[in-house]
């Protein structure tokens, strides 16, 4: 994490800042509005990113069932974007969800690429029936939603690694160093053998 940015669990005293972040980004149409009462009730489910004493990002881990949790109200202050704060927030929520026994983490988003880079998979909405039953059926955009559903299976001992180009979800398994190319090795052996044979031939 950036040395000047820290992640911590949300508290009631963060509600005003979280409300401000969400409100400032409603115009883009990528977030659902939240009431003050709702945020006060669920403030401790949030993880917040803090920079110089100011909340610059937030995300909520919202349980949908005993096994499925959702990344909700993920937002980063516009001036602080490009520092992978969103990825760090998702990673923190994934770790928290795993420790609490959830087997699946999901999100509904207009921007799936940050989630895909972290190992999430884009799936049909019907693959998350818990979300549909809880929120979607009462939404005016139901069946006309422009969001993508993304899923991440969770396993104990596996953590999300933001912005890694190859293995986005790393476990405890050690990756062996790259083996020499067999064809090159054989060519080197042949060249050496030919040289030894040439030295052995009498002049």
Image (cartoon, rainbow, N blue to C red):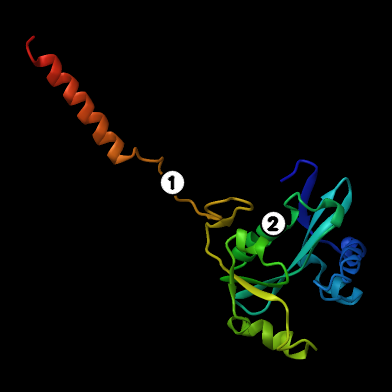
On screen, residue 49 versus residue 147, left or right, reads: right
Q: From the viewer's perspective, is residue 139 above or below residue 172?
A: below
Q: From the viewer's perspective, is residue 69 above or below residue 144?
A: above
Task: Give the image quarter of residue 147.
Answer: bottom right
Q: CA distance from mark 1 to mark 2?
A: 24 Å
Q: Secondary structure at mark 2?
A: helix
Residue extending farthest left: 202
Q: Residue at x 89, y 51 (%)?
A: 54
Q: From the viewer's perspective, is residue 178 above or below residue 165?
A: above
Give coordinates of residue 63: x percent, y percent: 68, 75
Mark 2 highlights which residue? 87
Give the class, few, some or many, for how many residues have Cα within 10 Å of label 1's Cα (few <14, many ≥20): few
Give coordinates of residue 1: x percent, y percent: 71, 46
Task: Give the image quarter of residue 160.
Answer: bottom right
As rendered, which of 188 and 121 lies closer to the eye? 188
Give coordinates of residue 156: x percent, y percent: 53, 61
Mark 1 highlights which residue? 175
Give the class, few, some or many, for how many residues have Cα within 10 Å of label 2's Cα (few <14, many ≥20): some
Q: Secondary structure at mark 1?
A: loop
């Amino acid at each position: 994490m950036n040395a000047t940015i820290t992640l911590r669990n949300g508290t009631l005293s963060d509600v005003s800042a979280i409300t401000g972040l969400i409100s400032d980004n409603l115009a883009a149409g990528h977030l659902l509005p939240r009431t003050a009462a709702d945020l006060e009730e669920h403030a401790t489910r949030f993880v917040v990113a803090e920079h110089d004493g100011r909340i610059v990002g937030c995300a909520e881990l919202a349980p949908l069932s005993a096994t499925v949790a959702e990344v909700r109200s993920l937002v980063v202050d516009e001036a602080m974007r490009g520092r992978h704060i969103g990825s760090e927030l998702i990673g923190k929520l994934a770790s928290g969800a795993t420790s609490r026994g959830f087997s699946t983490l999901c999100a509904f988003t207009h921007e799936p690429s940050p989630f895909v880079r972290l190992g999430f998979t884009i799936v049909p909405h019907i693959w998350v029936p818990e979300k549909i039953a809880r929120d979607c059926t009462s939404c005016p955009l139901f069946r006309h939603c422009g969001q993508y559903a993304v899923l991440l299976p969770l396993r104990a001992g596996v953590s999300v690694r933001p912005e890694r180009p190859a293995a986005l979800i790393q476990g405890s398994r050690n990756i062996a160093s790259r083996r020499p190319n067999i064809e090159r090795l054989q060519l080197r052996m042949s060249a050496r053998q030919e040289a030894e044979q040439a030295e052995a031939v009498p002049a």
